[in-house]
């Protein structure tokens, strides 16, 4: 059976809080994997270069001074380029499942992530937060997240990682070759800026194409998601020079 969802959905900037649907079946496993694979115990900042899928890890995130939810108190949109990325990585069916479950909702920028209301989770009082945030971290794989969730690190985390002092605190081998004597925190800043520019460019470009092709808004089905995946791949080809600095 073909699954489809119509309309633009939420008004831009609208904050939505609803009771949470049941979490994904593998949420606990993925949360554990997310925490144990970051390897930030010895490296306050670590850059994991992988082209447009690059991730930046920061040890401060698991002890955020702003609360248990940290940045996940206000999750970013899964924007047009993010959706194309997820589709390219084999997640089209997952996206449709999440839309059907209500954890993702069509919006003018792509898909809005449902926010859970404040609740006690494993004995701790969590504030309103992203529906995918569990007690031990993100409950979905990096391949299914907004790219922002994989690369965003706040100024405080970068400062703790050594950026403010200018002292290198940790170096991944591939990053050290590219950055010379620059610290991992400074490299993280450069990578963050490059990824932000890449995805902002992709979002604008894809949004214009959507408006042209579907003035009343797209139908969210397999065909539309496939189209987004193709637009994303085309965008990456046009920006391949920018991607070189994100390649190990």
Image: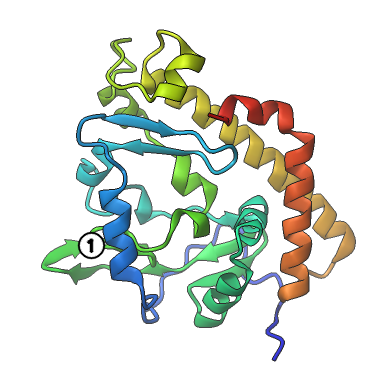
Q: Residue furthest bottom?
A: 1
**Image mark count:** 1
Whether residue 220 can be seen here: no
Identify the colour scheme used: rainbow
Circle 1 Cα neighbour tier, 10 Å, few/some/many (<14 / 14–19 / ≥20): some
Q: Residue at x 27, y 19 (%)?
A: 169
Residue 236 location in percent, x, y? 72, 41
Q: Residue furthest left?
A: 123
Report the side of 155 relative to 8 (left or right): left
Residue 230 location in percent, x, y? 78, 56
Residue 102 location in percent, x, y? 50, 78
Q: Residue at x 76, y 43 (%)?
A: 235
* Residue to which mark 1 is pinned: 135
230 versus 178 height, above or below: below
Q: Residue at x 41, y 11 (%)?
A: 182
Whether residue 115 can be seen here: yes
Q: Residue at x 59, y 64 (%)?
A: 111
Which residue occupies the foreground of this view, 180 or 194? 180
Q: Residue 6, located in which quarter of the rendered image?
A: bottom right
Q: Residue 87, located in which quarter of the rendered image?
A: bottom right
Which residue occupies the foreground of this view, 9 or 187? 187
Which residue occupies the foreground of this view, 174 or 61? 174
**SS class, disc 1:** loop
Q: Residue 4, located in which quarter of the rendered image?
A: bottom right
Which residue occupies the foreground of this view, 202 or 92? 92
Report the side of 135 relative to 148 (left or right): left
- Please state, as top left, top right, bottom left or bottom right, where the N terminus lies in the image: bottom right
Residue 148 location in percent, x, y? 50, 45
């Amino acid at each position: 059976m073909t699954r489809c969802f119509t309309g633009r959905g939420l008004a831009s900037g609208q904050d939505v809080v609803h009771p949470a649907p049941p979490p994904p079946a593998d949420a606990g496993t993925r949360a554990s994997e997310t925490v144990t694979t970051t390897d930030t115990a010895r490296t306050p900042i670590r850059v994991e270069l992988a082209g447009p899928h690059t991730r930046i890890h920061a040890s401060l995130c698991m002890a955020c001074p702003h609360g248990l939810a940290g940045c996940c108190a206000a999750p970013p949109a899964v924007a047009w380029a993010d959706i194309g990325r997820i589709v390219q990585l084999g997640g089209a069916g997952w996206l449709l499942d999440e839309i059907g479950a209500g954890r993702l909702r069509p919006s003018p920028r792509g898909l809005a992530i449902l926010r859970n209301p404040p609740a006690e989770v494993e004995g701790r009082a969590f504030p309103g937060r992203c529906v995918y945030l569990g007690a031990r971290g993100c409950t979905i794989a990096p391949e299914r997240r907004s790219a922002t969730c994989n690369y965003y690190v706040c100024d405080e985390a970068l400062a703790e990682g050594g950026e403010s002092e200018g002292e290198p605190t940790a170096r991944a081998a591939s990053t050290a070759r590219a950055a010379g004597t620059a610290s991992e925190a400074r490299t993280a800043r450069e990578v963050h800026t490059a990824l932000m520019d890449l995805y902002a460019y992709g979002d604008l470009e894809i949004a214009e194409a959507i408006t042209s092709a579907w003035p009343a808004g797209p139908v969210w089905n397999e065909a539309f998601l496939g189209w987004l995946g193709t637009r994303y791949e085309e965008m990456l080809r046009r920006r391949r020079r920018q991607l070189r600095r994100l390649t190990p």
